[in-house]
Amino acid sequence: MLYGVISGYNSLREVCGGIVSYGDKIGHCLLDYAIPRSTLADANKRRSPKVFEEIYYKVLNIILPIISDSGSKKDKDLKLYAIDSTTISLFQSIFECVGRNPTEGKRKGGIKSHQKLDVSTGMPVKIWNSAASKHDSVFIHMDGVMKAKEIAVMDKAYNNYSAFAKWTAGGIYFVTRLKDNAKEKLVRELDLSDSDPDEVLRDAIISLNYVDEEGKKNIELRLVSFYDTEKDKAFYFLTNIIDMKAIEICGIYKQRWAVETFFKKLKQNFPLTYFYGDNKNAIEIQIWCTLIACIMITYIQKILKKKWSFSNLISILQKHLFSYIKMLEFLENIENYAKEYMKTRRKTSVYQTVLDFP
């Protein structure tokens, strides 16, 4: 499955055909024979995606401290996470659809991947796959999504005052945007700091009403207004963080873009348009294998001294997935490898070079 997603294959036929083409090289990966397409299809249908989910989190726990950019920070510092979801369209209604019925009466299925992304590493640390019809805010209601001394930065689709009240009581912080239809009441104005730029228009405490299982309630939150000169637009940031400068709150929200960057990297470099099966298990397994591949390649990119773009690194790895070489050494000195190969080629005939080619 890793071979398939890294190679960019769109079907099991391509995956199995690609493995066959490597001949005896598959022995490097402890494969005694090329796996038939029917065997792989049956395995994807029967095996639980929980297996791959557990593998992802085990790999994550090993790699995360290595690729983190926040190793020098003190433990008392708040940890920043970006929360968002991405919807993957399916050609069949395997998962529940989202939106109104189209005029022709046919609806495509869709799977929504909800993710909590560690901003310092650019990798998701909490993932939940659901039908595309599930609302984004369901994710933040799940147990263990956020912990004390953590900051969640998210767009206004996640506005849920009941969840915000529980987070505030539990020492969990957030930065989001105020909804356009919010009915807020001013509690008091806060003084702007001398260091805040002119783009910070306002800093205030507001009150918002909501209803939970216990009845009508209200919550007091901080509202920071910021004018973006490039977009010629005012933004209204909602947060429960009181002891930060207003401009710092604005800066936190800008880091939400990290999760959008991750989704873009995922969809541009891995085949998530076509799936290796038409059942829930196969689809979720492919998504988990894509995430496993992504974090492993991110790890390689991080530890290499030579600078590689993510897409270029994948293109090189695709050609050597079954090669028995010291991959890190090869990637660090790829130019030298090419020079040594050319020296060897000049000393031998073309025919002999082909025979000796590994």
Image: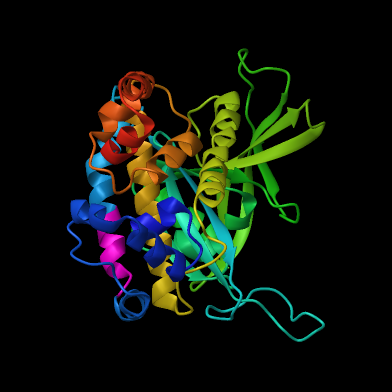
Image quadrant in which you'd find residue 109: bottom right
The residue shown at (43%, 69%) is 12
Can you say whether 283 is above or below 261 in the image?
below
Q: Along the line of sight, which residue is nearer the eye, 298 or 86?
A: 298
Say which residue appears at 61% left-offset and 18% top-offset.
193
Residue drawn at x 34%, y 49% is: 147
Which residues lie in the magenta part? Answer: 48-56
Spot the residue most to the top: 194
User: From the viewer's perspective, is 304 left or right of 61?
Assistant: right
Above or below: residue 35 compared with residue 188? below
Q: With 166 as the anchor, is 107 left or right in this view?
A: right
Is residue 160 shown to the viewer in this render? no
**Where's residue 169, x and y in %?**
40, 51
Q: Is residue 91 above or below residue 64?
A: below
* Image-based side of 100 in relation to 333, left or right: right
State whether the magenta stretch is mostly helix, strand or loop: helix
Q: Residue at x 70, y 50 (%)?
A: 184
